[in-house]
Amino acid sequence: MSHMWSGRFDSAPDEEIFSFQASFGFDRRLFEDDITGSLAWAEALARAGVLSKVEATEIQQGLTEILECGRADPGFVEGPDEDVHAFVERQLIERVGDAGKRLHTGRSRNEQVSLDLRLYLRRCIEVLQGQLVGLIQVLASQAESAGLAVMPSYTHLRRAQPILVAHYFLAHAASLRRDHRRFEIARDEADLMPLGSGAIAGSSYDIDTEALAARLGFSRVVTNSLDATADRDFVSGFLHACAITMVHLSRIAEDLVIMTSEEFAYFGLSDKVTTGSSLMPQKKNPDPLELVRGKTGRVIGQLTGWLTTMKGLPSGYNKDLQEDKEAIFDAEDSLTGSIRATTIVVGTLSLDIERTEEAAGGMALATDVADLLVAGGVPFREAHEVVGSMVRDLVGRQQDFSSLNSADWQAYHPLLDAGAAAQITARGSIAARRTPQSTQPDAVAAALDEVRQWVRSWEAR
Ligand code: ARG
């Protein structure tokens, strides 16, 4: 086969070298975007007077036919071509001959690949955002069905203070909302139309870049052809959004691995999402959660690998940039799989209200006892000291605050009595919160409402 650039060369490339540097094996995923870009480019060339109306129509028909073939049979998008751009051009020339040979006028693969990737990311980000909305929705549903159930919160993985189970689920929804926003920013970063940049110096044809941008649904045109042909910041931004989302999914996974263990058993994993052991009959392993956690390292690796690739590049296009695609596709696939798996796992999670309720009491109420003293006018540091000694005694006797009678309370501090002690419960602790971001039940109900509304607003788009 002859190559797009064979005129300049005495001999065909070494086969092994050719296949080493070819990208068709993976950039075939840009097939539809390449056609989208080429359809618009043919129009722009016709407007500029480079192509006749007839030629432009022939090209458009040819491209549409190629697109249909590719849609009908993914196996069609294959061949000995160097990359997807070469494939589409070859197919076009096979179909429409000379007119097809004119399509690449004034255009370089350097700008073409940037355009294709931007178009691809625009599509893919929307899908990922939709999947994130789905997961956030499932977290909101768990929050809703948990009602007023309580559980302990943890700092340093030691029991801290009681919270509503709903507050726990909404915490994860909050981090995923930030990710959703970060993808919005990544999409905005990809929203610049690069055609007209040529290989590096710009086009010498009279291309209406603004019209081309509008035609392709971009809101802006790049401002510098040299920058544009080598810029992949939008790739870095996308990978960054993927990596942080994975970090959040990994933390959800880690929480659930711990809190569904026999030791905690706050939540139960459905049989549908667990795996047995080939040896130990009693096992129900949280494999999908572990895989989400595991894949996080890989996606972080794609981001750091990509930034490392970028850092040494001189200005202008360099073939190193071709590495962008596998990083994107792998991050996308890992993230999609992980969001979906997490959605199924969270959606099928059961709650053991008795276990969480029991764990939410006990010493997790020590701060509330201190707050009681503070309410009576005792300086907080002093209150901390008093309650600290109570905790020390109780822990030594393997008891908690509920075992103290009126005289016991009084012995620790005259402001403490049985009446005050009645307030020392997990529910009392939760009800005592005041701030909107707290676990106070009305605050949590309002937060849940807000999440529901947000989900609806995105579903409506
Ligand atoms: N396959 C190439 C890539 O993905 C397309 C651009 C090729 N440009 C070039 N000058 N070799 O980056």
Image (cartoon, rainbow, N blue to C red):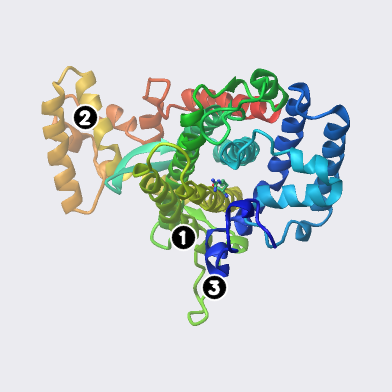
Secondary structure beneath dot 2 equals helix
- How far is disc 2 from disc 3 in space, using C-alphas? 47 Å
Question: Which label was assigned to residue 290?
Answer: 1
Q: Residues within 10 Å of mark 3 (few under 14, many from 20)?
A: some
Q: Is residue 355 visible?
A: no
Find disc 3 in the rendering and name its residue. 276
Residue 178 in the figure: left or right of residue 28: left
Q: Which percent across, then down, holds residue 156?
A: 27, 46
Amino acid at pointer 3 = Gly
Question: Which mark is nearer the camera, 2 or 3?
Answer: 3
Residue 445 in the figure: left or right of residue 406: right
Q: Which percent across, then down, holds residue 136?
A: 57, 37
Question: Which mark is nearer the camera, 2 or 1?
Answer: 1
Secondary structure beneath dot 3 equals loop
- In the foreground, 352 or 34: 34
Residue 326 in the figure: left or right of residue 262: right
Q: Which percent across, then down, holds residue 241?
A: 47, 38
Ligand 1 within 8 A of label 3's CB?
no
Amino acid at pointer 1 = Glu
Answer with mark 2 or mark 3, whichever residue precedes in sequence: 3
- In the foreground, 5 or 113: 5
Question: Which label was assigned to residue 370?
Answer: 2
Question: Residue shown at 19%/50% (left/top)?
Answer: 395
Amino acid at pointer 2 = Ala
The correct choice, above or below, for 446 with respect to 67 in the image is above
Q: Give the farthest residue toward the front.
A: 10
- How far is disc 2 from disc 1 in space, using C-alphas? 40 Å
- How far is disc 3 from disc 1 in space, using C-alphas? 14 Å
